[in-house]
């Protein structure tokens, strides 16, 4: 089973890019972030024509998450992150797909920091930690997939000082990611590429894609039962270089069935 995460950065604007990649890569499960579309604007019919069932939670102009399944319909289990009834941002969705529970997240960016956006980022991640622990404790096969907006380690970002004050690299952000791993989750890309530089995001600014000035912020974390089935992981880098591309590339894993 191939599971992928792809921050599409506007699903309707980049629908041709998404369709081309789906046809090429044929992932079984896809977690999408930054739909930038309302529920009614989500292109469910076009995706169905491409062979994918979907569940989604949209938001006008911002955020938005979806889970796609090739040849089947995901069974929705959560459409928001528990812990704050006042948080209306569309950043989390969860579904049962092909015998696994898949969580799709679009964590807050947190910039500028310090400030209220960074405080929200940390509070959101604390809620996610609590929910992730609950999922871990079930013993079910679970994948926590998406744009975490955290660069886990210095080797996960190109050599630069320009991100020194960025929320993505702050000690508090990295500590929260570390707490997730301490629960027992396996960082699939790092597991498969322990010594390699791997990026999933290249900003549009300052010629960063041609310079390969990237960051690794899209992650696939696996429960113990899924981690045992992990056989491959990677990033479809070439997708970032196509016309009209998102500033993220799809990251993926393959699991033995």
Image: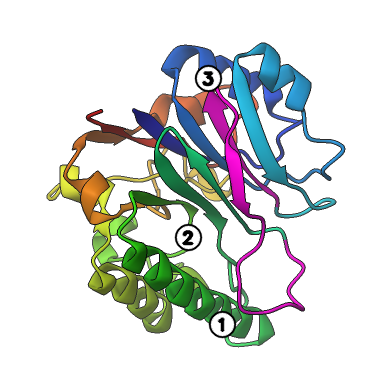
Q: Which mark is residue 148?
A: 2
Is the residue 76 above or below the residue 157 in the image? above
For the residues bearing labels 2 and 3, Cβ distance under 8 angstroms? no
Mark 1 residue element:
helix
Task: Determine the main secondary structure of the stretch shown in magenta.
Answer: loop
Q: Is residue 235 left or right of residue 148?
A: left
Asked whether, in this view, residue 117 is left or right of residue 104, the answer is right
The correct choice, above or below, for 216 with respect to 183 in the image is above
Residue 250 found in image quarter = top left
Q: Is residue 72 magenta?
A: yes
- Please report the residue visible at 67 percent of the width from the left and 79 percent of the height from the top: 84
Query: Where is the C terminus found, in terms of image quarters?
Result: top left
Question: In the rendered view of the protein, which quadrant contains the N terminus?
Answer: top left
Please tell me how crowded label 3 is: few (under 14), some (14-19), or many (20+) other residues with Cα within 10 Å: some
**Secondary element at image label 2:** loop
* SS category of the residue bearing label 3: helix
Magenta residues, start to end:
64-89
Q: Which mark is residue 22?
A: 3
The answer to whether residue 44 is left or right of residue 146 is: right
Of pointers 2 and 1, the one earlier in the residue sequence: 1
Q: Is residue 248 positioned above or below 239 on the image?
A: below
């Amino acid at each position: 089973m191939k599971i992928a995460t792809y921050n599409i950065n506007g699903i309707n604007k980049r629908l041709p890019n998404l369709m081309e990649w789906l046809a090429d890569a044929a992932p079984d499960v896809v977690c999408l972030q930054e739909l930038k579309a309302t529920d009614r604007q989500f292109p469910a019919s076009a995706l169905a024509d491409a062979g994918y069932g979907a569940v989604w939670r949209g938001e006008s102009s911002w955020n938005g998450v979806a889970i796609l399944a090739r040849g089947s319909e995901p069974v929705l289990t959560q459409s928001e992150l528990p812990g704050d009834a006042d948080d209306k941002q569309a950043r989390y969705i969860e579904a049962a797909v092909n015998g696994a529970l898949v969580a799709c997240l679009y964590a807050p960016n947190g910039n500028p920091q310090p400030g209220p956006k960074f405080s929200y980022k940390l509070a959101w991640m604390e809620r996610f930690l609590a929910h992730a622990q609950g999922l871990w404790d079930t013993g079910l096969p679970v994948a926590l997939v998406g744009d975490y907006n955290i660069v886990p380690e210095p080797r996960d970002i190109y050599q630069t000082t320009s991100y020194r004050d960025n929320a993505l690299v702050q000690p508090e952000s990295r500590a929260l990611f570390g707490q997730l791993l301490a629960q027992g989750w396996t960082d699939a890309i790092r597991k498969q590429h322990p010594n390699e530089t791997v990026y999933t995001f290249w900003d549009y600014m300052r010629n960063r894609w041609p310079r390969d000035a990237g960051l690794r912020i899209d992650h696939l974390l696996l429960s113990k039962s899924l981690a045992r089935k992990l056989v491959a992981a990677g990033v479809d880098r070439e997708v970032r270089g196509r016309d009209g591309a998102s500033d993220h590339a799809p990251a993926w894993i393959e699991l033995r069935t």
